[in-house]
Amino acid sequence: MMGLQIFTNSLAHFLAGVLLLCAFALLSQRRLAAMITLVQAEALVLSAAAFWQGLVQGSDGLFLTGIITLCIKGFLLPIALRRITRQFNLIRAVETVMPVGLSMIIGVGLIGIAVMVVLPGSAGTVTLTHEDLAIALSVVLLGLLVMTTRRNALSQVIGFLSTENGLVLAAIGMPGMPFVVELSVALLVLLALLVVGVFVFQLREHFETLDLSGIEAIERRGR
Amino acid sequence: MVVLLLRCFATLLHAMLMLALAPLLMGVVTKIRARLLGRRGPVLLQPYRDLWKLIHKIPLIPDTATELYKIWPFVSFAAIGAVALLVPGFALNLASARFSDFITIIGLFAVSRAAIMLAGLETGFGFGAAGAAREALFGLFSEAALLVVVLVFGLISGDPTVDGIATYFSFGQLGISVSLGFALVATLAVALTETGRIPADNPAGHLELAMVHEAMLLEYSGRYLALFQYTACLRLMIWFSLIATVFFPFGMAQAGNILSWPMGLISWLAKLGALAAALALFEVSTAKMRVFRVPEFLGVALLLGLLAVIFLFVAGRLSA
Amino acid sequence: MVGLPGRGMHLGIDPLSALFLCLLAPQVVAAAVAVERKSVTFWVFVLGMVLALVAADSFALILGFELMSAASWLLVLRGDRRPDGRPPATLYAGVALFSAACLIPAVFLPAGGIAFVLLLLGAGAKAGLAPLHSWLPRAHPAPSAGVSAVMSGGMVSVALYVIIRYAFIVFGNAAEPWWGTVLMAVGAASVLIGALRCLLEVELKTVLACSTVEHMGLIAVGLGVALRARAMDDPALASLALQAALLCAVAHALFKPLLFLGAGAVHHATGTTSLDWLGGLMRCMPRLGVLMLVGAAGMAALPLGPGFAPEFLLLHAVIAAAGSGGVMAWIGFAALFGILGLSAALALAAGVRVIGFGFLGRPRSLHAAAAEEADRLTLIGMGILAVCCVLVALTPGLLLRAMAPVISEAVPGALPQALAYAPLPLALLMAVLAAVAFVALRRFGARGEREVPAWNGGFGKPPVWLPFGDPATQPIASGFAEPVRRVLGPALLGRAGLDPGERYILAPLSRLHLRLTRLAELVRRATIRQRLAFVFGALVMFLLALGLGQNG
Amino acid sequence: MSVTAIAVLLPFLAAIGLGFAGSPLQGALLNLVVCSLVFVLTVLVFLAPGAGFLHGLLQADPLGMIFGALSGFVALTTAISNIDFVRGEIEHMSARRWRVYHAMCQVMLGASLLGLYADNIGLLWAAVEVATVAATLGVSLPRSASALEAAWKYFILGGVGIALALFGTMVLYLAAQPAVGPGLSAMSFSVLATHATQLDGRLLTLAFVFLLFGYGTKAALVPLHGWLPDAYAEGPAPLTTMLSGLLLNVALIAVLRFAHLMQANFSAGGGAVRPGPFLLSLGLASLLLTAFSLWGRRDARRFFGFSSIEHTGIAAFAFGIGGAAAIFAGLLHMLLHTLIKSALFQALTRAAASRGRASPGNFAFSHLRGMLATSKPLAWMLGACVFALTGLPPSGLFSSEFLIVSQTIQRQPLLSLPLGIGLVVCAIAIIRLIGPLIFNPPPPAAVPVKAGAGICTVGVHLLLVLVLAFAMPLGLVRMLSSIAGALQ
């Protein structure tokens, strides 16, 4: 029984770690295609984690979450994104604000901050949820970092997705979190997709590319 | 009761003398000056004759003047005349002593100055305005310097009225003499400017561009001019008496005591004569300044006043 | 419950507020009679002042104060029709807000130095005390005459009321001598700069506004002496100085509106208030001229005018105060005395200039030549004020006696002084002398007089095609002030001839503001990504601080 | 099913109807009808503060009631002026978009009410999220490049904000575990408030940071404000009114509630950090940044968007000062500002409509200037609204700002310096507009127009402001004070 417990924890940990690794790798990527792939991988790992937690906690809500994640984030979304890239042939590397190395160093720092904030200074009261939360928080922060360091609307969407993954990871780590939240997470992803779709649609109408420089040009006109 | 009567009588006498002797004083100054320059000069009564002559001329009113043209001479005279009553001459403790406040006197001088400046602006021609402008410029510093001197007096005697200051000084102590010396110099400078004498102005000058006091009266004639000129004489008289009373208070009579009057009268006339001589001497020995030098001249007076205050403080510390 | 939600507001009248209400009444009546009868904003303005005066708690006071500012701002805005760039309305609103921002803290801080300084900044800015005075000569002339009158006579008085109320009554027991010293220094600066500009300005209304600055300075000096004396518990001196200040406030509240109304009438009659274009108005508008003469006498602080008694008391108070303190105090008081004398002479010259170039001499423009007498209502309004002026001028003693309760309210244990200046006998004396001279000249002198072209140093009669003489030969007001400008200008106004308040306060402020605005523009123009970076950076910083705070 | 639930559900149902049928004008009328019904319901909520609906997920507390009624009122007046707006603009959007537009208005109303009445942090989050999506769609409706750009900004920044808020919500739930244990009750405001002292202070603090950033983004506190000016300036005009009138309050009140949890936990020594500094820093940042951003503006709606940032900043500052009186002042400030700002936007919309379309944008100051010459009542109303924003009496904001400043002086004297600077600079920046906007000569193309009867809604708003600020009825005073006392 004890052994099983340990095994459970370590597996959950392992999955979370992999997720974090993907998020971190996302930071290092310059090409959209590779970023999409990484997000997809994140989604798969996430759904696996969700299933595992559902198994452990014995709640069907988590299973549902996993399924939703798998379907939408694991398959639909990457496909859509790939289509967009092909449509606007955004195969070329995305220009980053800062050198990748620097952004990765910052990423490490973010992880440090996340751990520092979540885990109490006095070791001992450290529970699984705390560590889980720390990892989720790191993923969220890394996603945000991706959003802020890439000069390209699509890669911002990707970063946003990564952030979502972190949120879901946190959510499934919460013991007995009521159903509402997962639902709203799914809802959020749904709406996010919808709106992104709307956007991609019209952004193409107005600017040939997804690059935000056109928008910035508008913004430069003092108003 | 008797004392009160005597004081009133003394005041009346004082007023009479002031009003009557003013032109004579002017004559004396002119005479001495002429003598110092080696001329015979006009007779002493010449000012009376000039006034009489002017009175009997028909005044010519400029067509650009307003109704107030004829008011200004009277205003100016009334103010100076009032001062003449307030400033003690041969006797202290006159009936008007209570009102002989230094600041009131300065105010009355200002009134007459304002009247003369307005008279100069009355017809709206260049010379009068130029004179008025210069008068205004001089007025700034002379009034400031005079006020600082008044501050010195007030600090010494603790009494703002001329009469009180003179009474206090008549029992003069030492120790304050340094500052009083400064104050005297400052007062003299102011007096020269206020009475329109050299170096600030030249009463005998006849070049319009150089005149100050006369330039303002350029458009006046007949009895009005006479009144202005008489006022000028009176102003000189007042300043002499003022300086005599404040700085040389010795030998002054007490209005309440009739026996001391003759002595007082004599010493007063003597002081006036001495001052007239000094003025004449000063005038022949200096030249008239350029207009924009005068503020510096008066600025020095102002500084002397300030110095007087400081020395006063030092003296107070020494005596304490 | 009207007032602050949950707290309401309280009103009440004590001698001080009663005095200022009385001081407000005549000018409001006069202005209403003369010009502003139907303007709602004007009445809101008056309401604000009254509210500020009858307020019994800080909320009501500041509410009234700001209501007054806001209403007058609107009036300035409406009245300000000048084509030149920077309208004073915004500057004016800024000052109003600034004073509110200083007053609210001042009334809530515990009585002490900081509270007093804030109070002085707030109310002083409104009263136009240096160095925060430079808005006043711009804003006060802007609205119509009646409003200018009440602004220059009433609003500044309300600001003074606030200073007196707090410095003497509310903070009174915490007062320290340096408060008075600061007040005196501020007042001296205002007196000097106000009087100088009063002589140098060309626009009549601006001249009057500058003279307002000067008189506020005089009052501030009086209050300063009183406050210092009170802090050094010398009630006799304190009450003397306070008498001077209050009497000055009363006189100023009478003759300044009078002059402003007159300026308005002049503007209405000639279309200009520039002294360089007026002249000879005494001929076509004599009644107005005489009324202006009364006002100018007050402005120039001449004896037998309303302005002299306060000046007299003030100088005596300074003499009495000068004896106290160390050598610095002596030098300071001597310098103060010199400044007072200088500015008194400047004010005299300014008064002479207003009358001499506005109303005497020859017209300098066709408008001035063709001016018509002001309408009856204006004359009535000014007449009311002139009568009050004469009363105050001739019976200051009675007024001081009436003020006794105010003095004893502001200065505990006060013993009001008798006035050593008796205008009535003096007036009688001068009248007698003038009469004697007149009679004598009539009796002994030649009768009759002849009207001739002015001699003008022999330059002769102007040609016929120049109805009022060759303009080139006419002295103008700025020429009259030129010698003073040459002597004092470089020292006090700098080479550019700018008001120090503008050069050292307003200009740097506007530069700073420009710089900060540019900075804000940079933030505003950030791209989406940069804005995201703001959020992210702030979040990280907060988390970092949190982590360090909890683990460090 | 309680009044509360009806008030919340009605708009959503109406949205469905509006979204699929009807011509623009019909839509506007139906919109008006629904809004008036909702307003009545929000007032009725006072009488029957609905007992829990969906096992206590929906429970109107006094705070929610007051601001719910306010939202209802603003929605009502907006709907009234919306009719004229639709009349004027009808040919500039396709009927389909008009339907979406009206549907989105209703969704925003419903979501705000949901956010105000919700007793459950998850539900609150969902409400804000729905409102965001609706607002995004609404803003993107004009389909102009700048509108799309604004909507895009709104979506990105808002999405991030929502994500942060969700994370915060979860952490808060985790923080509630030791005290309340798993389950719905761990997400109920009332339960959390009662157990505030036993929450895990450390996690609570972490949660608060995220919630502050999440909901602070919605409340547009600097530096989270990036979306607001553009969203205000580009969306359809009445939508802007709804944004400023409804959503800001929801977010700010959420922040206030969470801050109260922190404060309670802190004062009980539960290990949480004092929320004051967070709120104070964000509030001051908003105030000071807007103080200088207000100057270069040429577009009226963008300008007043910045002023909204300023005023939410002031309210947040007041909450940060803490203490019953300051919180009272902050709530009062929110009430008054909402009324004034929505009135202002209504007047502005009418003014722009009276001037017609123009090249630099219908709301460019150069286009709107000189109102007095073309329409007196409109000009006076507009001027009164703009003036009311400055906080000079007789504007109502005077009393709230007076209270805030006095509280600052008494509790945090040093902070009153930046506060004063910010307030003064902002007020100057606003008051300087009145001259050009009202009194200057109008642009040559402008023609005199008659202001419709609808203008009186603005007057009603301003009257209400005066009453609330200077003669607040005792009942309301008691209610607000008790709220403030409970939240301090």
Image: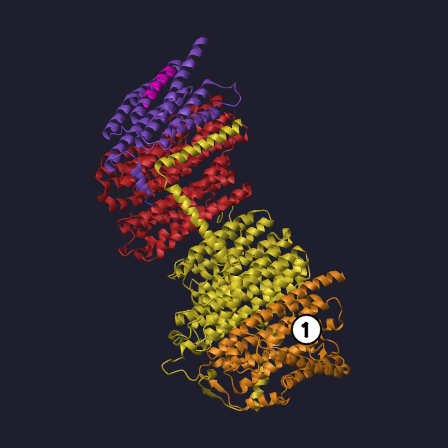
Chain colours: A purple, B orange, C yellow, D red
- Residue placed most toward the observer, C6 or C494: C494
- Residue placed most toward the observer, B75 or D25: B75
| Residue C436 highlighted magenta (yes or no) | no
Residue B164 spot, x, y in % from top left: 71, 72
Residue extending furthest toward the front: B38
- Residue placed most toward the observer, C439 or C212: C212
Give the side of residue B19 with respect to residue D432, left or right: right
- Residue placed most toward the observer, C69 or A221: A221
Could you tell me which chain the residue with mark 1 belongs to? B
Label 1, secondary structure: give it: helix
Q: Quadrant of residue A77?
A: top left
Q: Quadrant of the N terminus of chain B?
A: bottom right
Give the residue at mark 1.
B162
Residue B286 spot, x, y in % from top left: 61, 77
Give the side of residue C67 with respect to residue D269, left or right: left
Residue B58 spot, x, y in % from top left: 51, 90
Residue C87 visible, this angle: yes
Residue C409 visible, this angle: no
Range drawn in magenta? A39-54
Tell me which amino acid carries mark 1. Answer: Val
Residue C308 spot, x, y in % from top left: 58, 69
Q: Quadrant of the C terminus of chain B?
A: bottom right
